[in-house]
Image: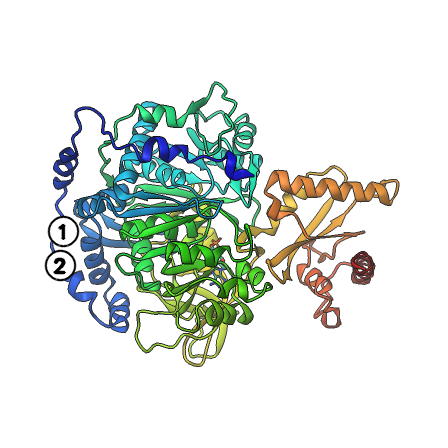
Amino acid sequence: MAAQRETALFWTLLGRCRTLVPGQSRSGWSRRLSSLPPPPPGPWSSLSRLPYRDLYRLSVTDPDRFWGAAAAERLRWMEPFQQVRDCELSRGEISWFRGGKLNVSVNCLDVHVEKHPERVALIWERDEPGTEVKVTYRELLETTCRLANTLKTHGIGRGDRVAIYVPVSPLAVTAMLACARIGAVHTVVFAGFSSEALAGRIQDAQCKAVITCNQGVRGGRLIELKATVDAAVKNCPSIQHVFVSQRTEKPAVMGELDVPLEEVMASQAAVCPAEPLDSEDVLFLLYTSGSTGKPKGIVHTQAGYLLYAALTHQFVFDHQDGDVFGCVADVGWITGHSYVVYGPLCNGATTVLFESTPVYPNPGRYWETVERLRINQLYGAPTALRLLLKYEDSWVKKYDRSSLRTLGSVGEPINHEAWHWFHSLVGEGRCPLVDTWWQTETGGVCIAPRPADPGAPILPAMAMRPFFGIQPVLMGEQGEPLSGNNVSGALCLSEPWPGMARSIYGDHQRFVDAYFKQYPGYYFTGDGAFRSEDGYYQITGRMDDVINISGHRLGTAEIEDALDEHPAVPETAVIGVPHDIKGEVPFAFVVLKEDLPDAAAAAAVLQQLRKLVSTKIAKYAVPEHFLVVKRLPKTRSGKIMRRILRKVAMETTGDLGDISTLDDPSVVEEIVEAHNQYRKQREEKKK
Ligand code: PRX
């Protein structure tokens, strides 16, 4: 079993190391920390006592006062900011808290170590139930400093990019905070991505180093992370060092770039001065998919991002001091950044790092973890709920869930069945369920119900209401803002907020084009939404060629690019189709070269295509359906009519709409026929 082979070396060697480096007494901590004066209670303390609605009103009528007060008091500044905001959305120019200097790691660690050094910061809920590791704020600060010093002694400093390719673990958090401490820019890459996907991100960001571990452990299985990194860095000349932690006992095969992390960190000082950084210095890049091929490196900066993550974490989830916050997302996605790491730690919370899967070792895993760790807020993706609700209710009922106060859902629309199951069965109808809408680009939750607003209704499967400073606008087909209620349109946000992305790394024009061009002066989200009779918002889904597989966002163009690399495949088109559990899955229409000898050769090509997507992107991106067609439906100008492909895949060809612009309308019949055959074959197979 994986449990016998796994280790918590990172913490047994370092985090729990009580000895301080010679010459550094514990009082040294307090001396150093006291040089950063805690802010006196100011306007935010009185403002935040206002009823939620009044606070929202203030945030949109007087954003400078609202955000200025929040930033001054909620963050620890090394130098005060001079200007609250300076933004010009039509040019994608966004700047908050200009002139201020601060350090994010000080705000997430030092300020809490001053007040409660032995409070648990992280509970690492490891793959094997009952083997959790707790890490206090003091331990996390010391280990972060050791890792920060390790990076510095290897030539990494302010502005350098560092890739982090590790599973959910204290190492991930420490690595992010160590970068933040010295002003390096982290880019966490989800540890399920392939070596090519990792290499692409490293190359785009020109990373100087990678932090990884020998193996990952998930669902009782071992994942060869170091081998993936080795394959990636072969094609990444910018990489100077690969820092390797030992997650399991199997020794990693070390090459010339590799640095044994625990060994080197053990000899580093547990104190590291925090770099004073400008509010608008880059904190991290996070790659995400758009409607065109290449993933984009979304840029988030220091002060605005941190403040927004912290305020949303507190208000959306009704987080109270002393709560145990359980966000089960992976740190490789924005949800992990904002609600496993930065939001909770800035608020001094105890945050859970969930390494396992919802069904390991059985479908009671989440609820057993809630009982054992006394989790107060549980935040996850609808895809996991849809999977779990298929099992007996007894898997939920046999565990004590009385600690739960707020439930949260994110990443994709939550269907009514999953909403009611989560709310009524898991939360016994007494915990508000917040369906939170947001994006990698927004930095934190933008639209959600408000559990802290007494008497406010929460309607099933509705994201509902804008957070502080957020002003949603729905646009009609002619690009005009739609007034009134009971309307659907393209969801835009009309005013800047501190957590919003600042750019796409290395390509600011792409940032402007993707988000600010279609509706000049507005941020366009790419999603559609409906405003109900009562003025609440419901997200209706993406309006572009981005799909959502188990809450993971992916551009269909990325999958097409991977498929098109096969020499026997002249052309493909990928669309998303609904799936019971995953929400959506990719459906690939594939044109094969005509000279393939027989059906066996075609089947072999499809098998190779599956492999291609898995090695170029990740396993989850492999299309669930492949339909071989002779040609694709195209307009006279050569554009693929995806609308028709969607109708074919969804078997709604009775209503094809206008096909007069098709170059050759007979293509539709061909594709419908091919799909009928495909459907029959699948039904046969099921029997
Ligand atoms: O389409 C929306 C969907 O996820 C997209 C953002 O994906 P990503 O940047 O990976 O961030 C996911 C986690 C914040 C959005 O454009 N989405 C996110 N939350 C919801 C949602 N769709 C419906 N309801 C939600 N609550």
Assess mark 2: CB under 8 A from ligand 1? no
Residue 21, horizontal then vertical, whole percent: 22, 26
Residue sticking out furthest to the bottom: 533
Element at badge 2? loop
Mark 2 burial class by Cα count in 10 Å: few <14, some 14-19, many 20+: few
Quadrant in which residue 432 is drawn: bottom left
CB under 8 Å between discs 2 and 1: yes
Task: Specify whether residue 99 is in view.
Answer: no
Q: Which numbered tag is attached to residue 65?
A: none
Residue 265: x and y in percent read 34, 27
Residue 39 disc label: 1
Amino acid type at circle 2 is Gly
Image quadrant in which the N terminus is located:
top right
Q: Residue furthest right?
A: 597
Q: Which residue is drawn at 30% across and 75% down?
A: 454
**Of the residues shown, which amino acid type is indicated by label 1?**
Pro
**Residue bearing mark 2:** 42
User: Is 91 situated left or right of 639 in this image?
Assistant: left
Give the quarter of the image for residue 278.
top left
* Front one among 587 and 482: 587
Q: Residue at x 56, y 28 (%)?
A: 231
Tell me where residue 608 sits by quadrant: top right
Residue 277 lies left or right of residue 332; in this view the side is left
